[in-house]
Image (cartoon, rainbow, N blue to C red):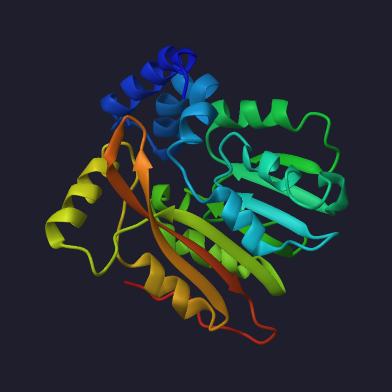
Amino acid sequence: MSRSDLPADAHVIWRLLRGLPRGGNHAERLQAFYAPQAAHYDAFRARLLHGRAELIAALNIPAAARIVELGCGTGANLELLRAGKRCLADYAAIQLVDLCPALLAVAHRRARELANVEIIEADARTWRPQHAADCVIMSYALSMMPDWRATLQNAWDMLAPGGRLGIVDFHLPDNDARISNLFWRKWFAHDGVHLCAEYLPALRALSSNSFIQQRRAPIPYLPKLRAPYYLYVGHKPLKPCTAVRTA
């Protein structure tokens, strides 16, 4: 981080301190929260949202794959896909889905010269691609979904047999102290991120062929705080699989 980051960071941190607005529906709250910070979103989140590059690498996405990202935000993961072994043009299609127009405006600018990239404003709980996806990605998005189980089930259902689901997100480790998890739950809920200990059991129930890794990472300007997050890659079997468990 350099001194030149400080003014932009201060703008974002102020919005985080104010928190997600309480009025309106989910889409309206997201727009009100992210629109004032959209221009500075990527630079700050690059130091807050860890593990995204590792997730893309672990997915090992094949050439000619159809990729869907639910809760894509500004489309920053395009840069990580571009930094991988393949050219973005090698993929059959990349569909980026989000409910926040302010963040999607940045994604549109990022993808304006990419003919195989489609930016879609839609609800991740219900939107479906015309063709089954070979890979579905969710990057710090599932924990912001009001009905995360429906979103997870939709992501799994849109996968083609043999497809891959990749998720990186914050969570509450089941082996952490109760007071620690209570702190993280309240900390993140202020900004519309709802943590629970049920994500990993639900993900394990989807596929017996999966990779899960739990990690911790520092928070900008608060290096002594290390937020818990996880990486998940699940492979959809060729035969029908278990649905997401209901609460």
Q: Residue 80's image quarter? A: top right
Outermost residue toward the bottom in this view: 239
Q: Is residue 130 visible?
A: no
Q: What residue sits 75% from the left and 43% below the top?
A: 82
* Image coordinates for residue 91, horizontal then vertical, percent: 83, 53
Is 7 positioned to the left or the right of 89 in the image? left
Outermost residue toward the left in this view: 179
User: Is 153 above or below relative to 92?
Assistant: below
> Which residue is nearer to you in this view: 194 or 57?
57
Q: Residue 16's image quarter? A: top left
* Image coordinates for residue 9, horizontal then vertical, percent: 41, 20
> Which residue is nearer to you in this view: 153 or 117?
117
Q: What residue sits 52% from the left and 67% below the top?
A: 153
Q: What residue sits 35% from the left and 42% below the top?
A: 218
Is 161 positioned to the left or the right of 168 in the image? right
User: Is 134 above or below relative to 194?
Assistant: below
* Image coordinates for residue 138, horizontal then vertical, percent: 55, 53
Q: What residue sits 58% from the left and 55% below the top?
A: 54
> Which residue is nearer to you in this view: 156 or 43?
43
User: Is 153 above or below relative to 161?
Assistant: above
Q: Is residue 60 visible?
A: yes
User: Which quadrant is home to the C terminus?
Assistant: bottom left
